[in-house]
Image (cartoon, helix red, strand yellow):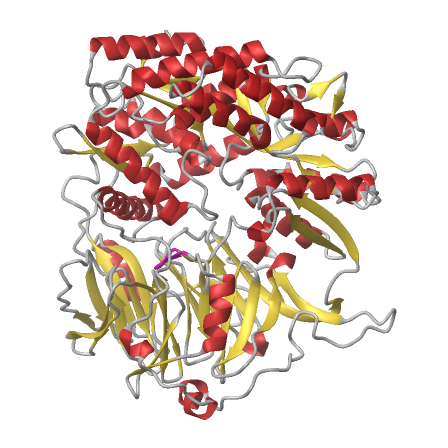
Amino acid sequence: MIISGTVCVLLFFIEARICYALRNGGVSVRGMKTGKRIAAWLLAFALTAGALAGCGGTAGEGGAADSTADGGGQQGENHGTAMGRYVEKGVELNGSALTDWNSRLFKQEDGSFLLADNSGFILRSTDNGASWTKADVPWLEKMKTENKYILTMAIGLDGTAAVVWTEPEEGTEDSGNGVQLKMDMQLTLIKPDGTEIPVEMKLGEDEWWINAVYISDDGRIFATASGANLYEVKEDGSSEKYLTIDGYSIDLVQFHGSCMILDGYNVDVPLIYDMETKEYIEDEVLAEFVRENFQNRDSYAGKSHDLFLISGGDDAIYLAGKTGVFRHVLGGSAMEQVIDGSLNILGNPAYKIMDMMVANNDEFLMVLTGERMTRFVYDPNVPSRPEEKLQVWSLEDEAVIRQAISKYQKDNPAVYVEYEIGLAGNSMTREDAIKNLNTRTMAGKGPDVLVLDNMPLDSYIEKGILMDIAPLLDSMSGEGAVFPNIVDALRGDGHVYAVPCRMQLPYVCGKKSDINRMTGLSEVAEEMELMRENDPDAYLMSVPSAKGIMRIFSPACVPAWRTEEGSLDTEAVSDFLTQMKRMYDAQINGIPEEGVQTYEADKSYYQEFESSDGETLEDSDEIRTRHEAIHLLGGRRQFVAGAVEDVWEYNSQLSVSKMEGFADYVSVPMEGQCSSVFWARTLLGINASSKSSEQAQAFLKIALGDEIQKEVLNGFPVTEKAIRDIYEKQRVVYKDNDYVSGQGGTYNLDEEEIIMLIRVPDEPEINALIAWIQSLDTAYVEDKTFENVVYEEGERYIRGDKSLEEVLGSIETRVGIYLAE
């Protein structure tokens, strides 16, 4: 049997769990780039372009753009418009559906291409990748009958295959808990005549299993094993350690003539290794380009790569990622953009490159995450850059906006979407970025579409800056429309000026008898005090942080902090801080030292490895959306709270109650100073003065449309249809794995590991989620400038540095200035 996407997900979760466990043990497995180079590279001499020629052909300067570059075509007959750019073309797979793991492309000696997918098929294309049909592969059918699960494979030019496989643990296929695989991955070579040669590999102590295999154009076979070692596999099945890159993890191996290109976790810049001279080659132009554009990249062997490198077949290599495709001659002085990622699917953060091939006629084939495949073909009759422009502005980079831009550009090739990020590069403060936007907007030079998260929404409405989009939203009907209650929560006097593209759900989760008593903010504080009284050593939420607790509960409170006239409601803020101090005191007075140390370790880990701009854990969304429910199983949480991030976290929370002894655990909407609250995310509005209002409305429709909503990142869709479509797909994909989509792990107080299977919800549970969303009528619209005043001053009161009256006076003064601006 061939490994399905369901089992692949299990493997992915296992790896993630191991990394998490190691991290909590003080070992950083995978994180940010170290900025260090291996010694061999440090000692490398500066090589001339001529010395680099052995890697791919005759090295050249590579400074001039060729005719295939975006924007590099000839002038059009009218208006002097530059013509020619790469456009996306569909790929016909003839009914075959890709999995989201280890789909790979291979060239063959006869000029055809192969697409291997570990769900159980190999496709062949004889028309440069435009269409694919199933290939007859006897050894693949044989492995199915032998009940072998394929993790990954590589196929050489002559048809030789190197296959990594394993078998199910005995008795797990019919256990009802999903197939559990043996972790001793095997590697077998299969010759074109069907001869099978088992491979003997002795892995290093820190290596878990063979996770990737590669075959060069001259037939050499290499394998990696989740670590720093690269192994060469011989034709007779023997193997030897070929290369070790201490401190790194190899996740991408490509071949360029006699050179090997390596990339992976902790790698500062891709490594170029000359297999003939056995030396590393330094290319400063390539290195500086990667540092500037792909410094904090991720790479998962067989899964996805933020940066993918591949040989161009001549003297150049190609680099591909979200910003596009770039051509570079090793040793040359230029990086030439061939494809602009902002004009196509590459700019969509929902998709990352899994594999890539340079086809004939300088076309590109790409297999992407999200079970997608596309090809890029150069069209000389398309303008290099559309002349019509739509401007979109957000304070911070928004993944959903990039998803929508990618879709909009594909549907509207004559319009160029210019996306401006106010805080890009951290060149100004949040307040300065907003003032700059306000000045431009009041002068009639503002963007067409505004993302209003952490913006003074009420002020914009009062000043008439935003268009009423109620007619647009009301024209959308049926399951594909935005939930009516979500729209109505932002409706005032019949008008709607902003709509969220995604949402998250404030919740509390724990034992039903405890959670049922948490019917408001003071009741949560009272319950925490009771828990502390009954168990002086309890962990409670295990959040020994005043600001952390405030930010966890504030989504269900902030809407109450403003009066109907828009001024500060001092009484509501006073009550909030009073209850927060009760919660903090109950939390901090008795929490075991191990709980404090773990929280501090989590803070350090977040800031070092996950924060993109130095943001602390307490300041981040992560403090609210961390996947905490699983820790209820180990006794290190008596209850948890925050915001359910997406459908996958909803699945995880439901799975807690399916563990033995936890049937009485529930997750319910958080009740604070407000009830029935949702966190409105990626709020879109249209500039009332926009000269492109029709295009702006079309952009909103795309952002709220089914294609984007089904793939929305970091949040729940805002349409019922998208949620049901997501779950319909999950139930199809995971049906053969007993609806187990993955697993998570934690440890109990005796340091014994607990494994939780994460299951896809059934129909009643999906309906319960829909009902939860349909019950919500209060929007939490985050405004960090406003809220941070309360958090900063509130900490001084909660910690006992100032009286409540003193901090309320400071809050009134500071907020008054902000609201008056």
Q: Which residues make up the magenta segment? A: 298-303
Number of disc labels: 0
Secondary structure, magenta segment, majority class:
loop
Q: Is residue 131 above or below residue 423?
A: below
Q: Is residue 118 left or right of residue 633?
A: right
**Magenta stretch: includes residue 300:** yes
Toward the right, the furthest residue is 78
Q: Nearer the viewer, residue 81 or 266?
A: 266
**In which quarter of the view is residue 663 placed?**
top left
Q: Position of residue 449 (x, y in %)?
A: 72, 41
In-front residue for pair 14/618: 618
Residue 477 seen in this snapshot: no
Q: Which of the two residues, 584 or 120, is positioned nearer the viewer here?
A: 584
Q: Residue at point 46% right, 77% down?
A: 284
**Residue 371, image x, y percentages:** 47, 51
Spot occupied by residue 445 in the image (x, y as percentages of width and height): 81, 46
Determine if residue 544 is in view: yes
Q: Find out whether residue 406 is within the magenta segment.
A: no
Quarter holding residue 758: top left
Q: Quadrant of the C terminus?
A: top right
Residue 438 drawn at (x, y percent): 74, 39
Q: Residue at x 55, y 75 (%)?
A: 327
* Foreground pick, 176 / 748: 748
The residue located at (41%, 51%) in the rendering is 99
Residue 471 relative to residue 305: left or right? right
